[in-house]
Amino acid sequence: MNSDLKSKLEILASNYSKPFCYSCYQVCPTGRCQSCGSDDLMRSTPNGCEYGLDWVINEILNEKLVPVNTEEAFEESVRSTLEKETVTIGWMSFDAVTIMKELDPISWKIAKSEYETIEESEGNIVSFDNGSTY
């Protein structure tokens, strides 16, 4: 993940969550527990509390972002480069994209993966889980 984006997400997560002392089970807005004096605080959201900001970032992303359907986007990209969307063999007409996917699924998967990599490098899509979801 882009370090600039990660730092912005950490700021967002910090603003979204509140410091929380699990020992005293109370919110600590100053960053130190008023009861026990601890500064070893968790982060609390309406959905729970835990140490660190990564889980808060994941929670925000899961709530606010819609995953991109890369299969559909790749199909549209391929369709836009084809002169004809149908292939005629004898008297039968077939959808060109469907034929490519059916005849060589491995090649299709590789091409889709390359498409995702290019889209990510151009900043059009972002993955927060190493390419499992965009």
Image (tube, rainbow, N blue to C red):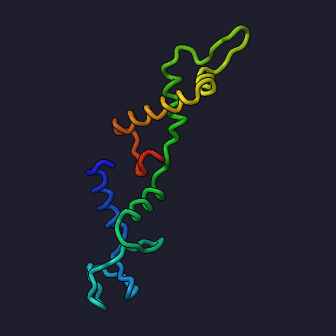
Q: Is 90 left or right of 101, judged from the image as shown?
A: right
Residue located farthest toward the front when viewing the structure as drawn:
106
Where 8 falls versus 126 (above or below)? below
Q: Is 30 left or right of 13, judged from the image as shown?
A: left
User: For residue 97, which quarter of the picture?
Assistant: top right
Q: Residue at x 34, y 37 (%)?
A: 121
Q: Quadrant of the C terminus?
A: top left
Percent of width and height locating residue 104: 58, 25
User: For residue 49, which quarter of the picture?
Assistant: bottom left
Percent of width and height locating residue 66: 49, 49
Q: Residue at x 31, y 61 (%)?
A: 10
Where 18 falls versus 38 (above or below)? above
Residue located farthest toward the bottom when viewing the structure as drawn:
35
Q: Nearer the viewer, residue 2 or 14?
A: 2
Residue located farthest toward the top when viewing the structure as drawn:
90
Query: Number of callouts in the render?
Result: 0
User: For residue 75, which quarter of the picture?
Assistant: top right
Percent of width and height locating residue 46: 46, 72
Where 26 falls versus 43 (above or below)? below
Percent of width and height locating residue 103: 62, 23
Q: Residue at x 48, y 27 (%)?
A: 77
Where 40 falls versus 53 (above or below)? below
Residue located farthest toward the right when viewing the structure as drawn:
91
Q: Residue at x 33, y 49 (%)?
A: 1
Q: Nearer the viewer, residue 132 or 82?
A: 132
